[in-house]
Image: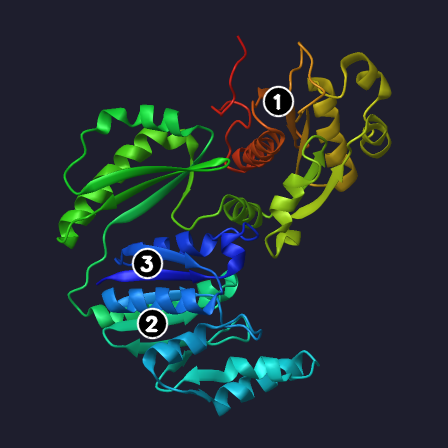
Amino acid sequence: MHIELIMTGEELLDGRVVNSNESEIAGRLLRRGFRVLRSTTVGDDPQRLKQVFAEVQARSDIAIVTGGLGPTDDDRTVAILADLAQVPTRREPALVETLRVYFEALKRPLGESNLKQADLPEGARSLPNPNGTAPGVDITIGRCRFFAMPGVPSEMKAMLEDSVIPCLVEQAGPTHTKPFVREIKCFGLGESKAADLLADLYPLPEGLEIGYRAALPEIHIRLQTDLHDAQAAEQIGSAYTQHVQSRLAPYIFGYDEDNFVELLAQLFRQQNKTLALAESCTGGLIARQITALAGSSDYFLCSAVTYSNASKSRILGVPETLLQEHGAVSEVVARAMAEGALRISGADIAVAVTGIAGPEGGTLEKPVGTVDIAAATVDQTWHRRFFFPGQRHRVQMITAYTALNMARRILLGLSPVQFETQEKKRA
């Protein structure tokens, strides 16, 4: 099955928006056994859109389109599809009613521009949009079946899973087989070290690939087969997954769709434990990682962003003498911050970070990238100093993950400080 993507929108070409939909669609399709053969990004110019749509229609069995389904004049996907199919557009009463109910719930008027989203090419089928107002479009033109979806990622993902992929599976028929695809997610090592630890697995059996992808600060390792024999693919893929697991066990935190913070949240909920933070060099980034997920109030109590020395003393109770004698970036201050956060919050676990994220502020003794992290419970306080080289964002992000990983290890009954990390020792 020849599948191509058409990603529309000037914002994808001028740098305003990162085209995350392309990788999202390709990855989700691959896990279902469908490989994208080509992807084209095009702006909103009508002539260029017509040209791209016509070229893809002539050579593809499936075309998946994102963008151009909104209410404004530069949303042209429906009109382009109708023109390519040589049919008029029609206004669907059922879609008008859906829009009316949606806007009534928002207590906003339904404008004429919004009614444009109820138009479909004649002969097309609408695809439900549970997260927005623009329905998708399913229409076959010649040999090619077009699926048009909104460009908004949350709307696109739901429509892809609920409508488009089931249609592809049905169209592929009972002989369609899924490849073995497993993604192993790690934290605490880089791509080169991961490759070194897996070097003895090569050469790989025919039909098996191992790929590496950096997703700061994580490393994702994908095992994928390209075998038509589903049973053989499963056997080889499963066996090599175990080989990879045995070599990377200290770094693995999840698989496939797993999310680092979601897994941490599950651990806190399962154990009925709570967390508090004291952040200096990360400036609230750790709290942001946690609260980006709904329901974090189940376990997350507070974060004290004590950026200045005065706030460390006033809010967390860090003695001024410690700050004067040892400096804010030091073991004793990190420990005092964690213990202060534990005390004022009443949490089960508190984690504190203090460091030099750069690009300025480093010294010979404490260069940029020096970070002290402490974790405290009512029974014990742990500390470890790290050196994370790189630009400010990288230092902050790795620090945030390392702090959360220390909390995770406490919940798992492991030492929060005796583990390998991306830390690079200075000579």
- Marks 3 and 2: in contact by CB < 8 Å? no
The picture places residue 109, in percent across and down from the top left corner, at 69, 83
Residue 59 location (% of width, % of height): 24, 65
Q: Which residue is mark 3?
A: 29
Q: Residue at x 54, y 11 (%)?
A: 426
What x and y, as percent, mark residue 36? 30, 56
Viewer-side residue, 56 vs 342: 56
Viewer-side label of 2, 3: 2
Label 1, residues with CA under 10 Å away: few <14, some 14-19, many ≥20: many
> Who is closer to the viewer here, 350 or 11?
11
Q: Quadrant of residue 345?
A: top right
Q: Which tag, 2 or 1, sits closer to the chain's start?
A: 2
Which quadrant holds the N terminus?
bottom left
Above or below for 196 versus 349: above
Residue that lies at the very extreme toward the bottom in this rendered image: 93
Say the numbered circle drawn on residue 369.
1
Query: Along the horizontal axis of the image, is 27 left or right of 101?
Result: left
Q: At label 2, which amino acid type do we have? A: Phe
Q: CA distance from mark 2 to mark 1?
A: 50 Å
Q: Secondary structure at mark 1?
A: loop
Separation of residues labelled 1 and 3 (CA atoms): 39 Å
Question: Label 2: few (<14), some or many (≥20) within 10 Å?
Answer: many
Return the x and y of residue 358 as percentages of the image width and height.
67, 25
- How many numbered badges does the structure rendering display? 3
